[in-house]
Amino acid sequence: MTPTSDSYQPPVSQLLKIGDPYDQRNTDYLALGLTPEHIQELIRMAQDAELDSDESDRVAMWAPVHARRALGRLRAEAAIQPLLGLLPQIEDDDWIDDLSNVFGQIGPASLAPLEAYAASPAHPLHARGLAGEGLVAVGKLHPASR
């Protein structure tokens, strides 16, 4: 394990062992014992660039994707701004597009920040497009917010 991955405590540390998220879109992260008290540690893992790029540990490198998905399942409104900060990585990380679903799961609290992000020419075009996809995901999962 890398020093970064050693810094996560259970149950968040369990995400280091799940592996490739491709066929695991419906992983029950809450069954791992993740609760709102773990949101800050999940945000830290979701943003962990060192862990995200650690190809020496092919299982743990997927933990940031799982942390992002867990934040969605927890409807973690506190994660909205930190996750928006990841959108520019869409150019280099194919899994960043998974964030549109995460924003959808977080729900209507994501709408105003996503709208502001998508409307700002200060952000890269593809990242703004992904913010737009997040708006669509919120509308699909929360029809009353359309």
Image (spheres, rainbow, N blue to C red):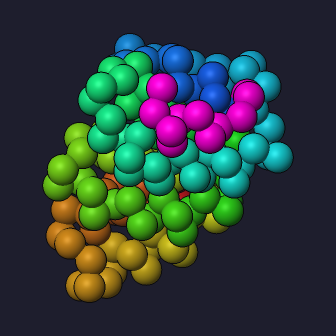
- Image spot of residue 24 (x, y percent): 45, 17
**In the image, is residue 81 above or below residue 29?**
below
Residue in view at x 24 percent, y 85 percent:
121
**In the image, is residue 30 above or below residue 51?**
above
- Image spot of residue 23 (x, y percent): 38, 14
- Image spot of residue 52 (x, y percent): 37, 41
Q: Quadrant of residue 57?
A: top left
In the image, 11: left or right of 146?
right
Residue in view at x 57 percent, y 52 percent:
44
In the image, 91: left or right of 102?
left
Q: Is residue 137 visible?
A: no
Residue range in magenta is 1-11
Q: Quadrant of residue 54?
A: top left
Q: Nearer the viewer, residue 85 or 110?
A: 85
Q: Is residue 88 visible?
A: yes
Residue 4 is one of the magenta-drawn residues: yes
In the image, 113: left or right of 33?
left
In the image, 5: left or right of 78?
left
Residue 61 is one of the magenta-drawn residues: no
Residue in view at x 59 percent, y 34 percent:
6
- Image spot of residue 115 (x, y percent): 43, 74
Question: How many numbered discs?
Answer: 0
State the residue lying farthest toward the front. Answer: 3
Q: Nearer the viewer, residue 140 or 70?
A: 70
Q: Nearer the viewer, residue 47 or 101?
A: 47
